[in-house]
Image (tube, rainbow, N blue to C red):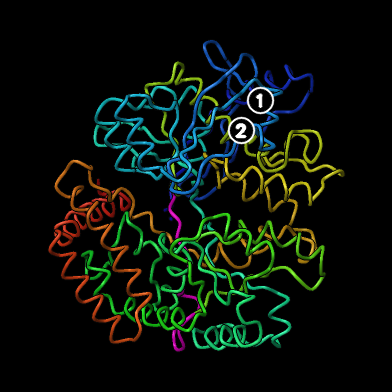
């Protein structure tokens, strides 16, 4: 889960590297023009051409690169590299092979075992500032990127100010994913079009509207359709989206383990005492006990959710990124029935609230997760250089549109891809869906304008499903929460030990409140839960995070 930064001036020498690499592939192509950088007045300008020199630099395709990678997320492993379009292409054409390490659901145990045996993967992909990665940093097991930033300048060019990503020692160890200075994100509500039409297309704007609609779904379709699918509830997902409907400016990130607090009067306060959270939990509990919410929301797998979405067995689907599954399912469903598929709605809001101040999702300038290179890597510079290529214009275009030559060919004067007359929207949609699990250093700043270049002149109905709703629904309704990054204490600190216990107990309290039999029981569970959390040291954790939050605000305001 997810400020404006001042971009650094572009280092054009990298472009000359791209030319040479492309020429080595037997295909001549113009290099991507340098991205425009903004000065203090917001005017775009570019650096003058610089003499290129690739001496000592790693260049894609010149020699083999093989390394191991591990995705540290529960129930979510990287797919086999060659099973993805970009992995197959880079393996066969550019000599890049990534050996994916799977944990098969036992991710905590897997990483602990690798750490204990000092048998680490070359690259680990997980949350920014993950406590386990902080432990590895302190043990000297992570590679700092500072010496590579000028040599391979895509991250520095497109990200800009990296200071808030630096560790306490002043060095940079994480390569962010989906970083951007502009609003982005995919959280929100997806609606089954066929079911909506069959029920008379009633209003779906307020929490009252949503409840009435879900009741109608249950009455008409019974157990064959899930009225409200909240994705993985233990990660707050769609239930967290519902929480934001009850407060103007309420943030999805408030429920994230990296914050787990509500800002109030300059302090971070307990989530469980927040009136907005309590009202939301009573609403959610009502939906749950009336079986309007998936009853296995707290233990279902990604595959189980995907199967329901792909087969159209959900009426309303909400989550941090429901567009991923719905975007894959939509074209398949409309093949079967032109009136089928999915559409997105403006975020649901409690009656009386300003619908334009409701934010179902959040974003930060630094994105959601990050790639870390460990000291186990034989050639960490080569891995960083690959990641930097992967996050640059050519790498992003290959991930989104396929290898150069079919759907795109070269770059325009703004550095965006030139789309060809052979551009195949269905193929591009499939490429993006299949590559998404390995888009581990995504560059939102570049790819969003690139994607929209092709779409902007098409009729609304012909636009790519995801891009269409990103432009009209999700991006305008995501909240910037950059001020809340880096709020995880070191695992072996007093606050870090408290955090581990608090996170575990909070999930238990959260689940119980969702399954409560009445509003009174919700209050009782949250009252007792807050007391139990405070007994574990939750208050101390909130005080520590308040200090760090205020330090972030000072940095963002240029006071540090």
Q: Which numbered disc covers residue 18?
A: none
Q: Residue at x 51, y 23 (%)?
A: 67
Residue 288, quarter of picture: bottom left
First in sequence: mark 1 or mark 2? 2
Q: Residue at x 43, y 81 (%)?
A: 289
Q: Is residue 117 magenta?
A: no
- 546 up-or-down from 104: above or below: below
Residue 141 image point, x, y percent: 32, 26
Quadrant location, the C terminus: top left
Left/right placement of residue 454 relative to residue 143 reads right
Q: Nearer the viewer, residue 200 or 109?
A: 109
Quadrant location, the N terminus: bottom left
Q: Which residue is mark 1?
A: 91
Label 2: how many Cα within 10 Å (few below 14, some 14–19, many 20+): many
Q: Nearer the viewer, residue 477 or 211?
A: 211
Residue 522 image point, x, y percent: 30, 80
Mark count = 2
Q: Secondary structure at mark 2?
A: helix
Left/right placement of residue 429 relative to residue 226 reads right
Q: Residue at x 26, y 52 (%)?
A: 554
Q: CA distance from mark 1 to mark 2?
A: 8 Å
- 242 up-or-down from 81: above or below: below
What is the magenta range? 349-365
User: Do residues under tags 1 and 2 come within 8 Å of each other at their CB atoms?
Assistant: yes
Q: Nearer the viewer, residue 464 or 494?
A: 494
Q: Which residue is mark 2?
A: 81
């Amino acid at each position: 889960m997810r400020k404006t930064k001042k971009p650094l001036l572009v280092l054009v020498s990298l472009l000359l590297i791209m030319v040479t690499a492309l020429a080595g592939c037997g295909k001549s192509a113009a290099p991507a023009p340098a991205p425009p950088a903004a000065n203090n007045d917001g005017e775009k300008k570019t650096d003058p051409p610089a003499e290129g020199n690739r001496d000592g630099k790693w260049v894609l395709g010149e020699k083999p690169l093989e390394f191991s990678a591990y995705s540290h997320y529960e129930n979510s492993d990287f797919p086999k590299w060659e099973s993805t379009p970009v992995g197959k292409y880079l393996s066969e054409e550019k000599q890049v092979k990534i050996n994916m390490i799977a944990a098969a659901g036992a991710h905590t145990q897997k990483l602990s075992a690798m750490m204990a045996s000092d048998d680490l993967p070359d690259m680990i992909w997980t949350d920014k500032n993950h406590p386990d990665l902080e432990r590895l940093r302190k043990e000297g097991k992570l590679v700092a990127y500072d010496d590579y930033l000028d040599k391979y300048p895509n991250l520095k060019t497109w990200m800009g100010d990296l200071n808030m990503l630096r560790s306490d020692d002043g060095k940079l160890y994480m390569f962010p994913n989906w970083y951007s200075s502009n609003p982005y994100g995919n959280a929100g509500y997806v609606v089954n079009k066929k079911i909506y039409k069959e029920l008379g297309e009633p209003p779906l704007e307020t929490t009252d509207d949503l409840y009435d609609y879900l009741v109608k779904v249950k009455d008409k379709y019974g157990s064959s359709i899930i009225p409200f699918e909240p994705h993985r509830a233990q990660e707050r997902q769609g239930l967290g989206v519902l929480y934001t409907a009850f407060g103007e400016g309420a943030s999805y990130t408030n429920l994230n383990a990296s914050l787990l607090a509500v800002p109030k009067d300059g302090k971070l306060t307990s989530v469980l005492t927040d009136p907005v959270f309590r009202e939301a939990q009573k609403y959610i509990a009502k939906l749950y006990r009336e079986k309007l919410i998936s009853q296995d929301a707290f233990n279902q797998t990604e595959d189980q959710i995907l199967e329901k979405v792909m087969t159209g067995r959900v009426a309303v689907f909400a989550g941090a990124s429901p567009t991923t599954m719905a975007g894959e399912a939509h074209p398949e469903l409309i093949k079967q029935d032109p009136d089928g598929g999915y559409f997105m709605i403006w975020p649901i809001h409690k009656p009386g609230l300003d619908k334009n101040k409701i934010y179902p999702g959040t974003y930060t300038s630094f994105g959601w997760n990050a790639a870390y290179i460990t000291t186990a890597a034989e050639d960490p510079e080569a891995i960083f250089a690959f990641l930097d290529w992967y996050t640059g214009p050519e790498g992003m275009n290959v991930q989104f549109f396929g290898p150069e030559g079919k759907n795109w060919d070269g770059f325009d004067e703004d550095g965006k891809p030139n789309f060809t007359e052979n551009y195949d929207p269905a193929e591009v949609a499939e490429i993006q869906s299949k590559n998404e699990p390995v888009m581990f250093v995504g560059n939102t700043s570049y790819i969003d304008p690139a994607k929209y270049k092709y779409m902007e002149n098409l009729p609304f109905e012909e636009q790519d499903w995801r891009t269409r709703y990103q432009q009209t629904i999700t991006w305008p309704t995501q909240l910037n929460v950059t001020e809340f990054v880096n709020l995880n204490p070191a695992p072996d600190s007093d606050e870090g030990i408290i955090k581990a216990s608090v996170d575990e107990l909070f999930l238990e309290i959260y689940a119980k409140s969702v399954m409560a039999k009445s509003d009174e029981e919700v209050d009782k569970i949250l009252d007792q839960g807050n007391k139990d959390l405070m007994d574990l040291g939750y208050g101390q954790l909130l005080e520590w995070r308040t200090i760090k939050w205020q330090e972030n605000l000072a940095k963002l305001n240029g006071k540090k």
